[in-house]
Image (cartoon, coloured by chain):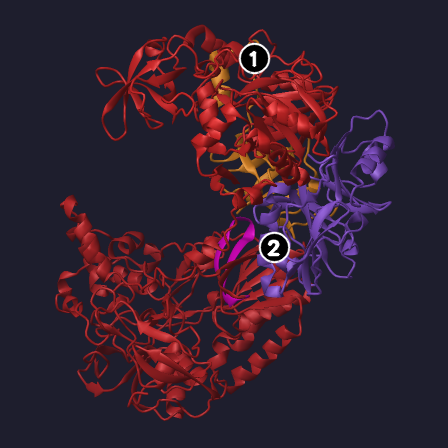
Chain colours: A red, B purple, C orange
Amino acid sequence: MTGAASRRLPAQAGELVDRSRPLAFRWDGRSYVGLEGDTIVSALLACGVDVFSRSFKYSRSRGVLSASFVDPGCTVQVDDEPNVRGAHRRLAAGMDVRPQNVWPSLRFDVKTANGLVGRFLTAGFYYKTFIKPQRLWPAYQQVLSRFASGGVTSRQNAHGYYDKRYVHVDVVVAGAGPAGLAAAVAAADTGAGVLLVEEEYELGGHLRFSGEESLSTLSELRAQVAARPSIEVMTDAVVTGRYDDNWVAVLQRNVGGAIERLVKVRAGVLVAAPGLIERPYVFAGNDLPGVMLSTAVRRLVNLYAVKPGERAVVLTANADGDAAVADLTRVGVNVVRVLDGRAGETIRRATGRGRLQAVELEDGTVLPTDLLVTATGWTAPTSLINMAGDRPVWNPTAARFVPSGDGLPPTVLATGGLVGDGSTDELIAHGRAAGTLAGDRAQGRAGGGVPDLACEPHPGMFRASTHGFVDFSEDVSSKDVVAAAKEGYDSSELVKRFTTATMGPSQGKLETINTIAVLSEATGRAIEDLGTTVWRPPYAPISLGALAGRIFEPTRVSPMQGWHEGHGGVPLLAGQWIRPDHYGDAAQEARNVRENVGIIDVTPLGKLELSGPDVPRLLNLVYVNKWSKLAVGSVRYGVMCAEDGVVMDDGVTGRLDEDRYLMSTTSSGAATVWEWLENWLQTAHSDWRVHVTPVTTAYASINVAGPKSRELMQRVVEGVELSTEAFGYMQVRQGRIAGVDDCVMWRIGFTGELSYEMHVPASYGLHVWEALLQAGEDLGIRAFGVEAQRILRLEKGHLIVAQDTDGLTRAHSAGLGGMVKLDKDDFAGKPELAWHERYGLATAPRLVALQPVDATAVPPEASQIISSNGDILGRVTSSRMSPTLGHGVCLAQVDPAVAAAGTVVTIRLPGGGDIRATVQEDLAFVDPEGVRLRA
Amino acid sequence: MPDTWAPVARSAITVPGPRSVVDGWEVSTRRSSAALRLSDASPLAKVSVRADADGALADAFGVRFRSSRRRDGVLVIGSGPGEWLLVGGVGTAHQIAGQVCGLVAGDFVSVVDVTHGRALMRLTGSDASRALSKVCAVDLSDAVTPEGAAFRSSVAKVTTDVIRDDAGGGAGEPSYLLHCERSSGQYLFKCLLDAGKEFGIEPEGPGLDSTGAR
Amino acid sequence: MIRIPCPHCSARNSAEFRHVGEAAARPDPSTVTPEQWRVYLYERSNPAGWITETWFHTMGCRRFITVERHTVTNEIRSVRPAGSSGPEPAEALSGRADAGSPDAGGQA
């Protein structure tokens, strides 16, 4: 404890603190004790601490202003959590609370120098000063970041747990003051489901701190809410935005084990009942600790039983200010002077060193005091209805912006202080009518009317005869606004951006009206003509963690992934798939395929089962080549082009039975091809009898490759004759593998070796994989990964769509021109390919194989091929060292001028330096005749 | 080489606990009495059927898209327009497929056994809707998703068939079957366990009996 | 997030769909000129107003649907299966938030 006397008052009606539960905590390195129910700030105030931060630009001491979530001077660091709203966050035992934005300490802050030179840090200072020269920007950045507010996040922090939830509800009520509570109850009584959202920890709004009568009304309203199970209540939660189709975002704090939860609500009707926010008054010294709003005083006294000062001066222009006077008097604060704004009375300035010491009146009287309370008007937080389409208008009688009543869809209603003023009973009546209408509308009924809630007259008090702060979080003074107006920034939106007023953490809730009022004064234009700035989401700050939530990033694995992980498989993320890249030595894995036999898990290969008599028509339409004569038991390689003739996907399709086909696609193209087929079938040929069933993961796919693969297959396959005469290259069979029925196997050769690709019912994938390894042990079998496969196919000159082609590569430029059958009636991309064949071939790039002249050279993929004068003639699309041949092997897209076999091209390496490479006769480096794969 | 192979089927979902082979499937025998339970139901037979949305088969099933019903021990789910998912006892896929083909001779119907291609799990407990609503944006209220309702939507960003099947849950509590591509099964299972954490969710092995009921 | 009243599935968040784009009729490839084909490929009207567009319900029924949407207000005035014509099933539109309770439209 510090030596300061306790400012805790005796028990107050409606207090939230539990005097039987003291909580020890630390502030700025020292130990303190508060009570359960305290906020961090109320606990500190009770202990006599009243300075919580330094201001953003001038490092001025700041204390309590509003004693609510938006209080700009009460942002603190709690443990590893920065930017905690200290006037809102409940105290917890053991909290380590520290001031932030103080360097090196709260008591001694080197930036106070800024205060001395403050008159130079005028509006636009940063914009004007830190512009040139550009080369100094890194230095500027370092300086500026020291001055930027914000706490500290530790790199050692564990990731916080955040959460999301979807809610579908008839009515959302944003705000649980008297009108909001009544609206929720009334909506529930129409049969509607209701979500009631309140920013504070408990329901009631201002009824919580407005005397005994309000408390009894509140307990009645709370009982009504509690008695209705169709009302879900969220406290310490805030509606941060309203979007199209009444998509309402609610941020809920500290719930379900999560730090924050983003609740995405689809609401039938949204009732905005945010109440009113008290507006500060602008005068010299209005930011001194000890200068408070009347609602801050009433919260501190009534909710936390904290005495906010000893000698008070009060400037009041409304009933709430009068009530604050009554509260202060009741708890023994010496109210030395009450000035009545309604009678034209005001103050001139507040003075003090680091905190309030005296108030100077207009007549020059100086009153020594430690508490100055102002009650000079309200701001209606029109944020939510603004987001729903309403443009608030200035009500000069009430001296605040109010909803225009126009532009709102029928699914958004407003009630309570946001709309107008009234007694508690009138607010409740209005809320009840709005709630009934909301409930009726949400259930498809017309519903009745809502009474008017008129605004009471309020003097337009914005600024005293002196200048003070209009924006406490951004340190923008009324003088800055006047200066901005003089420089020509004479509209509210311009002044906002130039001075940054309203752009700090409280986002205009405290600052907007004063900024516009001062601008009005400076420009001579009426406030109603200047208009207010537009409120955009979010209404309250949201952490990035809450927006990200639990991260839903689906991953997919094959049935053999566990085996890969257990055998040194290095994972590779390919799209959503986690696959083994290699098991330690990709080159060795590749060599083993050429020499013995290897198996690779190719489960991610896209697979679609096509059935129906019109499948050949579909195949003819989506592939550029011909499919009418594919026999049962055969497979064919096909290329798909989009309507612009660009290669989209490739793969083989096999005819399993009369009307049953298995189509394979690239791993990355599986979803696209499925959608592409459905597109044709649904929108262009709905009369065709074809059904497409995705079976990518129904089968575990294993490619068995290598000269000894037939021998291996003979040991595990039953019921299929495997001789090359009976089961030749590009044929498909169905049978039993390692005791597993319903397997599909086809002979294709992506690796260039004799190989069988088997598709096994996925639940048996691991069984078959292990059976193959066991059966092939004496044949030298080993598993190979994606990298070995890439090497093998490159040695064989097989292209990969989207690696060796790009978004402009037509079939001919991929070396696939010979497959394009323009004599077919129609196929996707046909017109483009026909024109291309006629007019474009001479200039279109070509796919060629390159062998670097230096046998040790392996140019990185995407290296450019250049002419002698440096023009780009193409690029390397694939490149590896060939373990089989002992030199580099590449595929490249090149200009036709250098595409002829034997041409020596220059490859410019990304890191600098050129190498030379020779264009090859054939795309294949290994076995161009295809003897091995046809074995 | 073994003279006879002994193939063992494995679900895409790994449930902790003791394992044993039941009906040819290696499964966890873990059971849970927690208030909210997530069980792997992948071994059940799953058959995908395509036919005219309003044709003879639809009439024979008596089930349209977005609804489901049990017929002769098989749960018939209207999983898409002109698309049905049939769920039955372990090892009955061929039998189910045969029955479907016999229902309407002559119509254009496709029947594909997707038992091994999909993962199936069941979420049961009084908080099942609350847990599911953390990862699924569809309204799960009784008014919109009553007993027997089926829909396909994003669950934790995985395309998933969801069937409200309290009857199959067997505990007189809300129960949902969730059906997705096999390769996403383990991911989805984990996501649901995470979503159910605040309700004390526990995983369990397949409670194997016909129609997906426990 | 706007909702698309899918004629098959009822109203769903637009994130479940892929926005295919403004509906464009495919010209007859046997008679088409390069100009006409490239209009089909690339030219879209991009109005600030009503547009007829195709959406694909990727994570739902996997059907292509034709939607008339106002690009300024996001109001949707009709939906129907792509490749079909005629009025949309009234059931799906009644599920819109502005017209009643969310995700209304009971079982088929």
Picture coordinates of residue A330 (x, y %)?
A: 40, 92
Picture coordinates of residue A413 (x, y %)?
A: 54, 59
Q: Which mark is residue B192?
A: 2
Tell me how far mark 2 sits from mark 1, CA to CA. 49 Å
In the image, is residue A445 above or below residue A609?
below
In the image, is residue C11 above or below residue A618?
below
The amino acid marked with disc number 2 is Leu
Question: Which residue of the protein is positioned furthest toward the front in this rendering?
Answer: A778
The front one of A243 and B117 is B117
Q: Quadrant of residue A322?
A: bottom left
Q: Is residue A265 left or right of residue A883?
A: right
The front one of A800 and A201 is A800
- Residue marked by disc 1: C29
Q: Which residues are magenta?
A: A240-256
Picture coordinates of residue A807 (x, y %)?
A: 44, 24
The amino acid marked with disc number 1 is Pro
The secondary structure type at the circle numbered 2 is helix
Whether residue C79 is visible to the viewer of this picture, yes or no, is no
